[in-house]
Image: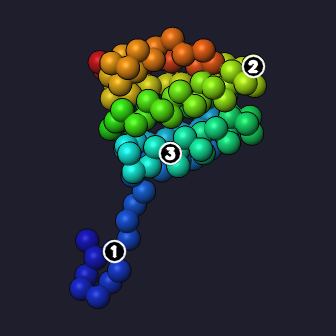
Amino acid sequence: MASVGEPMVRRPLCPVRRVGVQLQLSGEIDDSNAAELSARVVAEIGAGVTDVDLSRVRFFSAAGAGLLVVAARAATVRQRMVRVAASPAVMRVVEVCGLDALDGLWLTATGPA
């Protein structure tokens, strides 16, 4: 916690990090960051990412569904499959929105359901 007079430093809701051909996202994906994260995921797929790790995403709103749709489109355009490791929070939205069979993505559940 910041002391009086010290500026508050906000951590990003969803830090993103690239390690080789894997893009790792963790934290929360919601209306406030889904568009920015979607653009980053598409750019990284274009730059060679073949794995998107969402296993550490603890909150995934319906806005995150759009991220998966644009990732699938980016993979399909490049005629490749992108593996997505999905946390239970991500899988709930995938199932509710019927996104478990998107062309271009190979979704795998991680952790307890």
Of all residues, the one furthest to the bottom in this rendering is 5
How far apart are the two marked residues, 1 and 2, measured between alpha carbons?
A: 44 Å
Looking at the figure, which quarter contains the N terminus? bottom left
Q: Secondary structure at mark 1?
A: loop
**Viewer-nearest residue: 76 or 111:** 76
Query: Label 1 near label 3: C-beta < 8 Å?
Result: no
Q: Which mark is residue 8?
A: 1
The residue where tag 3 is placed is 35
Q: Secondary structure at mark 3?
A: helix
What residue lies at 33% left-to-right and 74% top-to-bottom? 8
Nearer the viewer's eye, disc 2 or disc 3? 3
The residue where tag 2 is placed is 79
Dot 2 crowding, Cα within 10 Å, few <14, some 14–19, many 20+: few
Looking at the figure, which quarter contains the C terminus? top left
- Name the kind of residue labelled 2 in the image: Gln
How far apart are the two marked residues, 2 and 3, measured between alpha carbons?
A: 23 Å
Q: In the figure, is residue 58 to the left or right of 106?
A: left
- Name the kind of residue labelled 3 in the image: Ala
x, y (%) of residue 105? 58, 19
What residue lies at 29% left-to-right and 88% top-to-bottom? 5
Q: Is residue 24 above or below residue 7?
A: above
